[in-house]
Image (cartoon, rainbow, N blue to C red):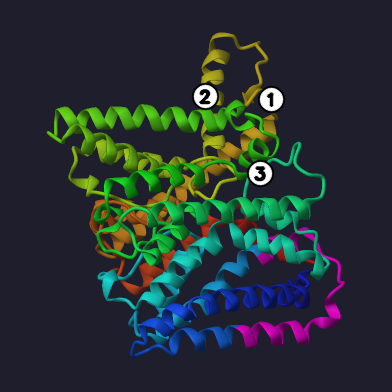
């Protein structure tokens, strides 16, 4: 049986051309650092920017006749998924040309890890990497976290695409209630909020013990829930003040940006009335205090160190950022198991974090509790509610299915890694760290570890997991289905 695709490929290529133009312009912003350091491979960034910009222009010129073409939802899903690969392909050039990585697989791994805000790295000695490459590395996370989606929606009207499918596919659960009726206006406001948080954190870190370069790199990685650092020792190499600042902005990155925008724009407390956000704060406070007490009383940490490390680690795992201030795998095993489980959950929907998301977690908990009630009262009709709103039965089934498939994929990934000779802790740690876009896990990929020694095939498997985690499974599964491509 033969079938014909309904994808409007010229329009998709035009969109990719615009994305590459944006990526090339971001590469140009790194050139001042390239000029100042004047290293042996200083040509790598300007040459990468030139190739990226030229490719983008060529795609735009050759597809100019399709500017006003109509689009479909399948065009949107296809474009979301393919965009990460295109951006990562061109984004890997600086790593390869600067000799920062030994081969294409490692370069593509590092770039895809950045754009998907995973933070998994194959660089064992980060300080040895040129500064302009490290700045580009953090910038890929900033683009991938939220700005690339905002930019996508901002330029989609010029392609004749509405952009709503891309936005919903990428940032699941974003609520448009009470937001400005003009989507473009709202998009730019979200972009402004994202940029404001980045600049504010940069200034606060600069006032501490970081120089401006380090402050900028870490701000780009924090607000995107990325986790790339300029130091092998990560945030643990900086002062307590810097660790507290990063913790605060990690919390902001785990919030629903639409609710943040509502709260700031209308001076309301919309975000505090949101059940998902309240649960996020409750879990963070309770687990931070609990782990801190164990570190204080059992591990003989000082009072300040115990709670600082505890809250930082909980927030980093919960928001799937992947930053660390200490090696939590040296703590009592039940403590890092808690962090391991938090990586699965993830923070709020509409944030830059990965994981299952708290919204689905709440549906799972509420539905499980109601099922127990139905056993006692089989005739009772009690709907599942989240944030005061009833969830349809089909909605409950979809979210439960998502959670089931998510854990199934995690298990398959761990089994594949075990089959290639990796130990148990490393296998489950790498599987959840890439699928949930955390980067830092347990075992060999724990704090300070890297993926450089992994067999090449497993790196490609983990790259697939990064992509699955970023597009939230269903979009990519839909793309891989036969019915998606049928005429």
Q: In percent of the image, x 49 and y 62: which residue is there?
A: 141
Residue topped by disc 2: 368
Mark 1: few, some, or many residues within 10 Å (few <14, many ≥20)?
Answer: few
Count of marks, rendered view: 3
Query: Along the line of sight, which residue is nearer the eye, 424 or 32?
Result: 32
Q: Which mark is residue 130?
A: none
Query: Along the line of sight, which residue is nearer the eye, 463 or 226?
Result: 226
Left or right: where 76 falls relative to 191: right
Residue topped by disc 3: 174
Quadrant that contains the C terminus: bottom right
Identify the magenta region.
53-79
Would residue 164 be counted in the magenta stretch? no
Label 1 element class: strand
| Quarter assignment of residue 50 | bottom right
Are the residues at dot 3 and dot 1 in contact (C-beta closer than 8 Å)?
A: no
Residue topped by disc 1: 390
N-terminal-most mark, 1 or 2: 2
Residue 331 sits above or below residue 155 on the image:
above
Q: In percent of the image, x 40 and y 59: which residue is there?
A: 218
Left or right: where 271 falls relative to 106: right
N-terminal-most mark, 3 or 1: 3
Query: Along the line of sight, which residue is nearer the eye, 114 or 309?
Result: 309
Mark 2: few, some, or many residues within 10 Å (few <14, many ≥20)?
Answer: few
Quadrant that contains the N terminus: bottom right
């Amino acid at each position: 049986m033969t079938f014909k695709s309904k994808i409007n490929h010229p329009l998709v290529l035009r969109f990719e051309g615009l994305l590459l133009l944006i990526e090339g312009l971001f590469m140009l912003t790194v050139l001042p650092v390239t000029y100042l350091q004047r290293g042996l491979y200083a040509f790598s960034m300007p040459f990468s920017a030139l190739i990226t910009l030229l490719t983008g222009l060529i795609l735009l010129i050759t597809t100019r006749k399709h500017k006003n073409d109509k689009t479909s939802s399948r065009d949107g899903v296809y474009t979301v998924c393919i965009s990460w690969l295109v951006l990562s392909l061109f984004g890997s050039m600086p790593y390869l040309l600067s000799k920062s990585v030994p081969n294409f697989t490692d370069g593509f791994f590092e770039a895809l890890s950045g754009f998907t805000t995973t933070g998994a790295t194959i660089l064992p000695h980060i300080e040895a990497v040129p500064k302009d490459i490290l700045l580009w590395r953090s910038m890929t996370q900033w683009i991938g976290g939220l700005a690339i989606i905002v930019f996508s929606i901002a330029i989609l009207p010029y392609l004749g695409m509405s952009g709503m499918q891309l936005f919903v596919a990428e940032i699941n659960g974003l609520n448009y209630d009470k937001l400005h009726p003009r989507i473009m206006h709202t998009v730019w406001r979200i972009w402004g909020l994202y940029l404001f948080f980045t600049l504010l954190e940069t200034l606060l870190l600069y006032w501490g013990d970081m120089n401006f370069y380090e402050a900028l790199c870490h701000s780009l990685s924090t607000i995107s829930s990325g986790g790339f650092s300029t130091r092998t020792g990560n945030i643990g190499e900086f002062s307590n003040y810097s660790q507290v600042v990063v913790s605060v902005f990690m919390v902001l990155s785990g919030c629903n940006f639409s609710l943040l925008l509502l709260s700031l724009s209308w001076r309301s407390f919309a975000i505090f009335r949101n059940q998902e956000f309240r649960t996020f704060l409750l879990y963070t406070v309770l687990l931070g205090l609990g782990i801190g007490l164990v570190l204080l009383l059992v591990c003989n940490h000082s009072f300040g160190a115990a709670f600082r490390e505890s809250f930082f680690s909980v927030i980093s795992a919960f928001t799937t950022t992947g930053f660390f201030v200490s090696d939590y795998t040296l703590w009592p095993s039940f403590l890092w198991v808690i962090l391991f489980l938090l990586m699965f959950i993830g923070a709020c929907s509409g944030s830059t974090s990965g994981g299952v998301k708290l919204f689905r977690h709440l549906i799972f908990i509420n539905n499980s509790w109601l099922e127990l009630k139905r056993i006692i009262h089989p005739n009772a009709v009690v709907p599942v509610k989240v944030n005061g709103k009833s969830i349809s039965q089909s909605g409950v089934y979809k979210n439960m299915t998502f959670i089931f498939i998510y854990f199934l994929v995690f298990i398959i990934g761990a089994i594949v890694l075990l089959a290639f000779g990796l130990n148990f802790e490393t296998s489950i740690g790498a599987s959840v760290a890439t699928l949930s876009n955390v980067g830092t896990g347990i075992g060999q990929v724990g704090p300070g570890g890297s993926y450089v020694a992994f067999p090449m095939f497993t790196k490609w498997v983990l790259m697939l997991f990064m992509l699955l985690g970023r597009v939230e499974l269903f979009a990519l599964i839909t793309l891989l289905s036969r019915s998606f491509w049928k005429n």
